[in-house]
Image (spheres, rainbow, N blue to C red):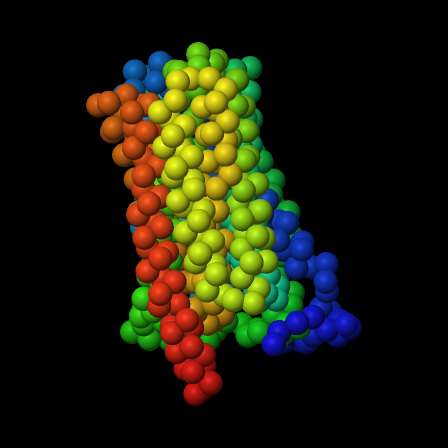
Amino acid sequence: MLGHSSTQPAMVTGTQTVAASRFYPWLVFALSFGLLLSDYMSRQVLNAVFPLLKAEWALSDTELGALGGIVALMVGLLTFPLSILADRWGRVKSLTLMAALWSVATLGCALANNFGEMFIARLCVGIGEAAYGSVGIAVVLSVFPRHLRASLSSAFIAGGAFGSVLGMAAGGTLSAQFGWRWAFAGMAIFGLVLVVIYRALITEPRLQAQRRALGEDAAPEVQRESMTIRPLLSALFSARSILCAYVGSALQLLVMGALLAWMPSFLSRYYGMATDRAGITAAAFVLAAGAGMVVCGALTDWVARHSPSRKWLMAIGYSVTCCVLLAVAFRLPAGTAQLALIGAGMLLVGGTAGPASAVVANLTRPAIHATAFATLTLANNLLGLAPGPFVTGVLADRIGLLGALQWIPLTGLLAAVCFIAGRRYYTADLERLERQRGAK
């Protein structure tokens, strides 16, 4: 049983003595969370300026969806190999390099003069952001006790929603006041400032000291180097319940990705809102999604504190309820009732993130957590966040944006089916993993 000691002894790392601290893990969380905000601010600021780009460059909804989806596609394709490289090269150095790259690429978006240039800049944003979520959450979880995993995972992942809020709201405001180019430039400056702060305050020796204080592996990246591909793949994919968690999480996030990308355009087209007001209003809905992630994660930890399998029941409930709320909402006429139901659905749209992340952490060893979360991120992006905006754009060109948004929430039912299957196998898979650990 892991826990905190009442005293914080000095820990020796190489030739350097570092004192364990209750404050330092929260500093790690705060700065890692801040960079995640920057990640999603740079990613989602585009959504706030969709109407301006559509008018200035005469873009179709499919092209707009491609600009939104290319980032998630690159994240999905590159998160696994880049996470492995980060484990071996050093997580702190990797995180700062990633953040610097996506910030510079966002500055490139501000300088783009046509669809092609913007597409290339957005592709580079995706390369920079590819492994941040998986490596960042591995760093955060490594310095906290196990019983906080669902809460911390959901709170950290909620940074994506909060970053989207800030990106949409600030992007809408900046674009209305100074033009859409300054919306991208503002996000880039924020990211570069955080890179400097993170690199100065977060160090590998301090992270290792915290892991030792918790009784965890002090340097999981060293242990990972000796693991060959076959055992690694077996650890990541052999359990049927973990496969269900990957796919279920991704399908639910397809709904979230579609709404994050298209809510400003929906409000502009069907409620006649100006760019700045549509961005701020959409940001409020995304804020509800972020708050819902945190609350759902904490609620899941509380409900499942004595029965881990209840995490699956919570994920099932979040998916089904969200599907019903959003499917009904987008079939109502424009008005207060529609907006209220959309808001209620947004509270639950990311609720499965915490339970899914906790399940993945519980079913894998700490030494491969970065790669395990990379696998979850890969699934989330390739099956969810990347196709969400693009598929919605393709449907919108054929049946209208409202028609597309009426169908997209039904993906949540498929997510619920995956979680139902995962719950069936979870206990046996967990017991098998514990036996394997005990045999070593």
From the viewer's side, name the closer residue of 190 and 237. 237
Above-or-below relation of 93 to 424? above
Q: Position of residue 31 (x, y in %)?
A: 62, 49
Describe residue 64's horizontal placement relative to residue 157 as left or right: left
**Residue drawn where x is 44% and y is 52% of the image:** 315
Above-or-below relation of 371 to 412? below
Q: Position of residue 419 (x, y in %)?
A: 37, 56
**Residue drawn where x is 43% and y is 83% of the image:** 435
Image quarter (top left, top right, bottom left or bottom right) of the N terminus: bottom right
Among the 4 quarters of the image, the one containing residue 326: top left
Describe residue 140's horizontal placement relative to residue 266 as left or right: right
**Residue drawn where x is 65% and y is 65% of the image:** 206
Whether residue 225 can be seen here = no
From the viewer's side, name the closer residue of 399 and 153. 399
Q: Where is residue 136 in the image (x, y as percent from the top left)?
A: 52, 54
Image quarter (top left, top right, bottom left or bottom right) of the C terminus: bottom left
